[in-house]
């Protein structure tokens, strides 16, 4: 029995990552919504800054928020932390399995930087750690007192990181590392600031002391930052299915534009939760999204290889596919680093090559993300011949 344990491990990690990630995102969105919908208590109660009555699932709920902490600590106190921790742990294990163990295929692009596997891993890990240190220092500096200024400056930092990573990694590798950086910052906020500050508040209550209000303020700020970084991370999680994003020569612009659209949508919802329905934010979000899509289409058209003014036979096209594609895209691939059949696409017969001609055109001719890793050197001339045959076969450009 031939079992591909790497693929099954990938599936298991990805499934758990999605499960715990949904839980973390759900709690983040809910508590920011809850905070924005608190109203003055009908009956004044010492220390209570607001309350909310809600109905859900056939029951009524009454939430109260204390400005600093309740006079007495309840016996049963739930901590929201494991959702964040397990999301980061499973995400890092997936990153290690796909992009570090499989660095030659998914992370390294020899046309950008001739890196060894360990050099690429070192750059990736350094980017994760370094970005957190920069973010944390920014939060603790003067700009951390103004969320608007901080948001602009952190966006500029991340834009710079995205441009740099795009110059040394494959497009897909650069995208996923930007997402991993944001995910690391979010989890580190929980681990290094939010939970420790809450523990200090609890310890002060147990000791009979008055907790420092600054602890709660700092924790709330980091929680709000996490809320705004969530949607860009979600986009990056699904971006590897869409090579027109990371396979574009201006991938970092597309990443920035789609992240900006997510920020506008998130900000619109947060403002709406406090009763300020500012539809211009929704319009700006859609404009950023549509503008990015138009830019992606135009720039992708520019990087297309023009078809040749000659007839390309199927035999010649098939030779290119067999040399550069079938090592992976086969029922029993010679290269098993990417699983049994990447994308479920086999290219071993004339029927299958013609059936997947449009996909081959997108992946190998337009975005040029295939073959992965560049270990099998395919020339622009070969891509051009392959694209010419596909256009001639289909009677049009896919």
Image: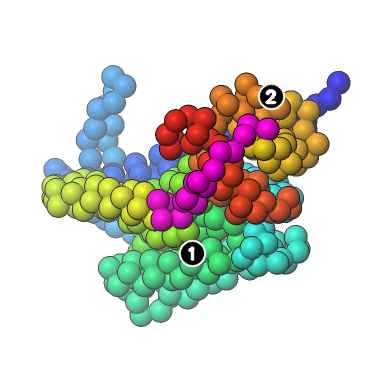
Identify whether 356 is placed above or below 305.
Answer: above
Q: Quadrant of the C terminus?
A: top left
Dot 2, how many residues are within 10 Å of its Cα: few (below 14), some (14-19), or many (20+)?
A: few
Disc 1, SS: helix
Residue range highlighted in magenta: 300-315
Q: Quadrant of residue 219?
A: bottom left
Q: Which residue is mark 2?
A: 349
Is the residue 336 above or below the residue 356 in the image?
below
Q: Where does residue 96 sit, x and y in percent of width and height?
A: 69, 51
> Can residue 187 be seen by looking at this rendering?
no
Residue 22, percent across and down? 47, 37
Left or right placement of residue 135 versus residue 169 in this view:
left
The residue wearing badge 1 is 162
x 62%, y 21%: residue = 351
Q: Residue at x 61, y 52 (%)?
A: 381
What type of secondary structure mainly makes up the magenta span?
loop
Q: Determine the image quadrant of residue 387.
A: top right
In what quadrant of the picture does the N terminus appear? Answer: top right
């Amino acid at each position: 029995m031939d079992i591909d344990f790497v693929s099954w491990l990938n599936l298991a990690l990805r499934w758990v990552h999605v499960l715990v990630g949904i839980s973390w995102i759900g709690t983040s969105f809910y508590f920011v919504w809850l905070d924005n919908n608190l109203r003055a208590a009908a009956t004044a109660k010492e220390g209570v800054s607001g309350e909310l009555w809600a109905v859900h699932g056939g029951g009524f709920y009454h939430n109260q928020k204390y400005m600093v902490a309740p006079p007495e600590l309840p016996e049963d106190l739930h901590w929201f932390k494991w959702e964040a921790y397990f999301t980061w742990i499973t995400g890092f294990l997936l990153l290690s399995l796909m992009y570090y163990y499989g660095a030659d295929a998914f992370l390294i692009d020899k046309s950008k930087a001739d890196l060894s596997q360990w050099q690429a891993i070192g750059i990736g890990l350094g980017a994760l750690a370094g970005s957190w240190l920069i973010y944390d220092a920014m939060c603790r500096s003067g700009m951390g007192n103004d969320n608007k200024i901080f948001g602009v400056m952190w966006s500029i930092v991340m834009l710079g990181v995205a441009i740099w990573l795009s110059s040394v990694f494959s497009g897909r590798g650069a995208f996923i590392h930007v997402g991993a950086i944001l995910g690391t910052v979010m989890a580190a906020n929980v681990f290094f600031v939010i939970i420790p500050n809450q523990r200090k508040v609890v310890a002060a209550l147990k000791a009979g002391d008055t907790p420092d209000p600054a602890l709660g303020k700092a924790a709330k700020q980091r929680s709000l930052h996490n809320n705004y970084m969530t949607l860009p991370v979600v986009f990056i999680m699904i971006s590897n299915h869409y090579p027109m994003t990371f396979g574009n020569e201006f991938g970092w612009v597309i990443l920035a534009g789609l992240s900006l659209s997510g920020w506008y949508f998130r900000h619109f919802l947060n403002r709406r939760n406090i009763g300020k329905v500012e539809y211009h934010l929704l319009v700006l979000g859609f404009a950023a999204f549509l503008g990015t899509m138009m830019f992606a289409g135009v720039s992708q058209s520019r990087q297309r290889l023009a078809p040749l003014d000659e007839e390309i036979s199927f035999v010649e096209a098939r030779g290119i596919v067999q040399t550069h594609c079938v090592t992976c895209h086969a029922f029993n691939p010679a290269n098993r680093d990417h699983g049994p059949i990447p994308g479920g696409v086999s290219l071993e017969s004339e029927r299958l090559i013609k059936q997947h001609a449009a996909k081959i055109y997108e992946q190998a001719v337009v975005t040029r993300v295939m073959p992965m890793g560049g270990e099998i050197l395919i020339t622009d001339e070969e891509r051009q011949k392959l694209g010419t045959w596909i256009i001639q076969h289909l009677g049009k450009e896919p």
